[in-house]
Image: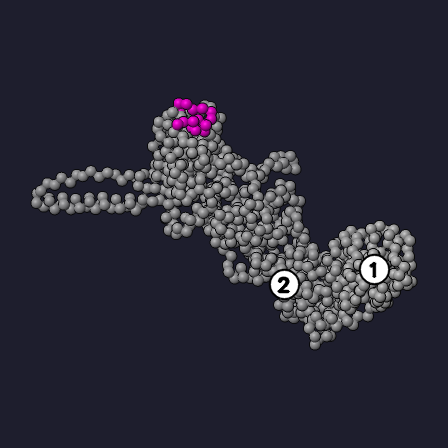
Amino acid sequence: MIIKYTFHQLLANHIIEVPIIQRDYAQGRLSDNVNYIRERFVKSLVNNIVQKEDLHLGFVYGKIEGKERQREAKLHQDSVKTLLHTVTQYAHQFNIDVETKININEIDETSSLIFIPLDGQQRLTTLFLLYWYISMRKGEVSKELLNFKYNNRKLALAFFEELTAKGNIEVIHKELSEELDKQITKYTWYLDKWKYDATVSGALVMLQTIHKEFSTHKEFDFMSINLKDLPFKFDFLDLDDLRQSDELYIKMNERGKQLTDFEHFKAWLQDCMNKKQLSIDDKAFLERFWKKIDTDWLNFFWKKIDADFRSLDDFYFNYLKTLAINFHLSTSKNTALPNHLKELLQKIRNSDTYNKQSVKYIPLSQFIIELKNDSGILEIFELFSIDCLRYIDSTMSTLIEVEEDIKYKINSIVKEPFISKGKNILSLYLKNNAFTPNYWDQVYYYFILELLKSNKINIDFWIRSMRNIIYNTYIQSPDNVFDALKSIGTLLSSDILDLEEALKSEKFSLSFFDKSQITEERYKCTLDPTVWDFNKIHKLEDHEYFMGQIQFAFDLATSDKDLFTKYSDLLSELFSTRNNEIYLQQALLTKGDYLVERTNHSFCRISYDSLRSRNDNWRQIFDDEKRRNLLRSLLDNLLDLSDLDLVNKLNTIIKNHKFTKEDWEYYFVENGGAIKECKYNEIRWFSANDVRLLHSTAITGYHLELRTMWLFQELENLKFDINPFETKEYLWDKNTGGSPGIKLSSFKLGEKVYDLDIRFAKDGAGYECCFFHKAATINDRSADEIVIKSLGDFIYDDEYKHYFKKVDKEKIIEYLSILTSKLSTL
């Protein structure tokens, strides 16, 4: 049962013992965030005393010990009284007078009841120091203060005993200085070792803060104050009345020694709300809100997070901040993202995976911002406004009360590849690996919880269709998140109950989101479920590469349901693994030049990294009619080869290509290694005779050339004997004017070492062979006469000091065999 108490009543009726399990007193810590909280809190306390206004300080939870002893003592008293009454009545029967008056001491409730605070210790300690300060200013000792015990530290316990000693209080009162904290530490009863105790140090800081704040009220009369009348009240809850197990007590005290940012936040938020002129309805709501935030919701997070309890407040606070910013983004009346919301969103978002050291601290002062509207009038923005708290309340209730069948339905639709492996959408923000979801997940999470709050029908369609729309729209910035949440908020607050029916209308609109995906979802609504196999459609949507966007499959099949079924099976297998990628690229190239042209030409990659990776690669083929026709031709060819597995089908198509060595395509189709050498599956195309294989996306990086790379691989495949050269290697080059090729090196004869560089002529005339002595300077590159004779018709180039010969591309391997044989005889 919740009882309203003043602090004085709590002290008068109980001995307060802060238990060993509790942390040090932290409201006196010297840090930016604590300083802000302390100064605001003390200012509020002092103002309420001066102005004689009540101040509600939230809930105080704990255990009361001694109630059983009290009951037993009362029971014994009653038993004795009953026995004496019986004796008296019996004696009267025989006219015997019996003296039955006895002295019974009243049960001392104060000494017999011990209150052990499990939540509220910080506020109770601050109030104790405040009451001590007022008593000291009056020059007297309030006996109730002696009922406050700090049993979690022996040093702190001893300090508080000395602080409340009558003689010490009188001396401090008489010698009061501006620096109360330093004054106390100068007395002989103050032990030097106390300065190393965090609770004692914190208490001194708090006393000085209280002293400083009262100094701003010069005319205040301390003698007019009765501690009984001070206006500070609590909602007091004896947790034994709830019949909770000790597990709850442990959980409520396992958050570590230092006061967390979340605990500071709760105290700050309650302080802010207490200062407002609230309606009766808002006050009743807040009373329920404060209770839920420390009980139902806390317990939910404790059960759901996969971190230890010391991290609980980080998860809890991170989630509440995310709900708050989502609320303001979705309900903003602005058409563009305001700067204050953008900055808050960026500050609230933390690292993807939970790391206690990297959790951002946001000063509480930044949750309330002064803004000027378009008319220049000053307005106050509150991140945690009363409307926002109502939104948090409804969202938390929805999250906690989701029925199991709905959870199953959501998780069976919103899975990989839409959400990362090992995650589910309703567990975002609750797991180490989902501490801060990406923007897409943040938007979809908002959508799904708002959907569950609504009375929409055909829920499965809402979940799937909006999944496809959200995850196929670029949401990469705070501005995108703002537009997405506003659009979803508008949609869900509309009178549309069935999204499937609404999409069938051309009048349906959904701002911000990808128009082509909305068009695709509309097309699916037109398909007759008695004709089309929607299990097949959904399976293709769920494919890790297609990720909800499958309009191209309908286009390939020209809306033929039977052909769609055949194509969808084949497409799923083709794009299911990167192991098929090279074969797919080679086989499709046999149907025509499908490469996507940008600065570079791309073979396309099966990449699952991001929406951009999908859109910049194979979706370029899917969405282009000419290239899509090439893919259709390949699919039809594969369907005709019915007796083989997929890889053998692709290899059959590759082997039956019609290209010759005159065609640049020949070198890619004949040798998949050429595509593999393109790290990002991109080439730089200068002409059909000058094709560079890029190891990065820029031509400025080192790269290879197509035909010399093919030649290198052919020599490898043929196990070509390069003797008398010792090594064979690529000649890497960079920039547009570069001339990459291959090199045969380290032919040693006499005192000289010779190399042979081979490049492909940019005019397509064949291979250019350059032979030279590998010398320190270019002028010393000439060969010995015996070598020159073996070179035959090589021409000496006086400019580059090497021997040069062009070789027909059809005869290059044959020529290299002849040349190495001649040189081997020397």
State how the image is colored.
one colour
- The secondary element bearing badge 2 is classed as loop
- Label ID, residue 542: 2
Say which residue label 1 marks: 749
Q: Which residues are magenta?
A: 173-188
Contact between marks 1 and 2 (CB within 8 A): the answer is no
The answer to which quarter of the image holds residue 537 is: bottom right
Q: Amino acid at mark 2?
A: Asp
Q: Nearer the viewer, mark 1 or mark 2?
A: 1
Crowding at mark 1 (Cα within 10 Å: few <14, some 14-19, many 20+): some
Residue furthest toward the left?
94
The answer to which quarter of the image holds residue 622 is: bottom right
Which one is nearer the viewer's eye here, 96 or 12? 12
Residue furthest toward the bottom?
643
Q: Real-space Cα distance between discs 1 and 2?
A: 65 Å
| Residue at figure coordinates x 67%, y 53% from the top left | 474
Which one is nearer the viewer's eye here, 540 or 731? 731
Q: Amino acid at mark 1?
A: Leu
184 drawn magenta:
yes
Crowding at mark 2 (Cα within 10 Å: few <14, some 14-19, many 20+): many
Horizontal arrangement in the rendering, residue 582 relative to residue 790 (left or right): left
x, y percentage for residue 29?
49, 36
x, y percentage for residue 224?
39, 26
x, y percentage for residue 784?
88, 58
| Residue at figure coordinates x 54%, y 48% from the top left | 319
256 drawn magenta:
no
| Residue at figure coordinates x 39%, y 42% from the top left | 19
Q: Can see residue 119?
A: yes
| Residue at figure coordinates x 45%, y 29% from the top left | 181
x, y percentage for residue 223?
39, 25
Residue 603 higher or lower than 135, as above or below: below
